[in-house]
Amino acid sequence: MNLGSSKYLGLALGDRSIQAAQVRISRDRREVGAAGEFVFPDGLSWDDPAAVGKAFRQFLRQQRISASQAVVGVPARWLMAREKDIPPATASVAASALRLHAERDFPSDLELVYDYAGQSDPQKPRKVLLAAMLKRHMDRILAMADEAGLSLAAVTSSSLVLASASGGSDGDVLSLLVGSESVELVFCGQTGPRLLKHLAVPGGAIGNGQTAGAMAMLGGEVQRAVAMMPRGDSSNGSATAMLWDSVGLDPAATEALVERGGMQFRVHGDLSALGVTSQRGQVTDGRRIASAVALGLSAAGGRPAIDFLHTRLAPPKVRRVDPRAVLVGVLAAAIIGGLAWLWIDVLRKETAVAKVKQEIKDEEGRAEKGKVIEEKVKFASGWFEQRPPDMGCLRELTVLFPPDGRIIATGFTFHEDGKVEVGARTPEQNLALVLGDSLRNNKNFADVVLPSIGDLAGRFREAPFTVKFVYVGKE
């Protein structure tokens, strides 16, 4: 990110608030100037981003915040994030593969914007974090910034930026960010972010005086999230756990969180972890605007891990022809035409030859497609032309048997020479004779042999009999 000023504005968005911090960066110092939290008044919401922008512009004036270059961070609850494995590939190939993953893994009925955290490697596989945000959130952010008179440098995740700014570890880092509106969990490996998750807050928003019982419940959520967390990149498999406390948890609440979460957290509660100082004491409670400060600092540190404003997963743009190039081409063609008519004639012939070659190539392509279709038709025809005759025989017999089940078939033998033996039984002996007449009258059967009435008589309630014939039908 190449910005022309050393004064940047970090904006951490919430459902009903915006944290703002103005950061000044010089060669040897990083200072936080004017800062504050804009809480939406009653009747104001993100459904009307223009109204939010007007009110926020007035807030910036009241806070004497003059920076116009802003980095916006959104909460994790606005995002969908999943870890993905990508094979060895260049950046462009990896982007194409991740676009396909995004279309497959995220709801297709939603209009989304995508980006990913991490880098591909042509030599070895990598893990990246694929993230998506509703496009309507992006449209609202742009409309708000435009109305507030701000120029956006990036739209990213607040918790990812804060976790990166306060990490300070060469191995795997687990960061728990406790805010007034949300609790977010971030896991970063050596190759970049691997997990971004919003955790449910017991009893709503967190503030000072949060009970230890509620924090113990939150610790259970952390423990479940850690259990499902991807394996780290470090060689020993261990991870550093960090807790950014932006609300001022009491020691009992922190202890309950650590005990239930099963991890010993390194607690950050002020801006010292970000390596910044306050200009003339303007910031009295730095922990509440830590996310905004980290976002402001990221403006001078290059592209954030995820940037929905300059996403690497945007569809490739179709390059338009530069009008100046068209003018140069026309002039060159006119000069060449005036000096060498013969050369133009050669070009025409070459064009005609190229056209004929292209037509031949197209015909070859159509011929190849025709061969593929022909093979498919031949393959499918085999299922009909080579159907075994015993299937046709069974179909014809099924039609001739009475539908009410008064004749029950007990056996079916089909010989290679077409001779068939069918065993059956019936409580009514005359039905066997009717079946024999039906077989004789069917052109698909010949040499029908059926026992006589005497042969069918017996002591059984249902007289068993066997009918023999030759199947002459074809399938």
Image: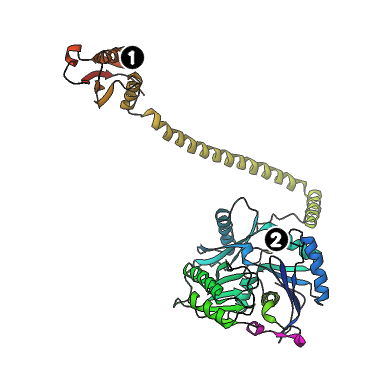
Please state which amino acid type lies under the numbered disc 1: Lys
Residue placed most toward the observer, 223 or 301:
223
Please state which amino acid type lies under the numbered disc 2: Met
Q: Which residue is mark 2?
A: 138
Q: Which mark is residue 315?
A: none
| Residue 405 in the image, given as x and y percentages of width and height | 32, 22
Residue placed most toward the observer, 13 or 179:
179
Find numbered disc 1 in the image and state the secondary structure of the residue it sits on: loop
Q: Is residue 336 left or right of residue 99?
A: right
Q: Is residue 253 left or right of residue 246?
A: left
Does the magenta-highlighted stretch encompass residue 417?
no
Q: What residue is shown at x 68% (from left), y 74% (from top)?
A: 295
| Residues drawn in magenta | 269-281
| Residue 422 in the image, given as x and y percentages of width and height | 25, 23
Q: Which quarter of the picture shows residue 446?
A: top left
Q: On screen, 275 above or below 137?
A: below
Q: Which residue is mark 1?
A: 443
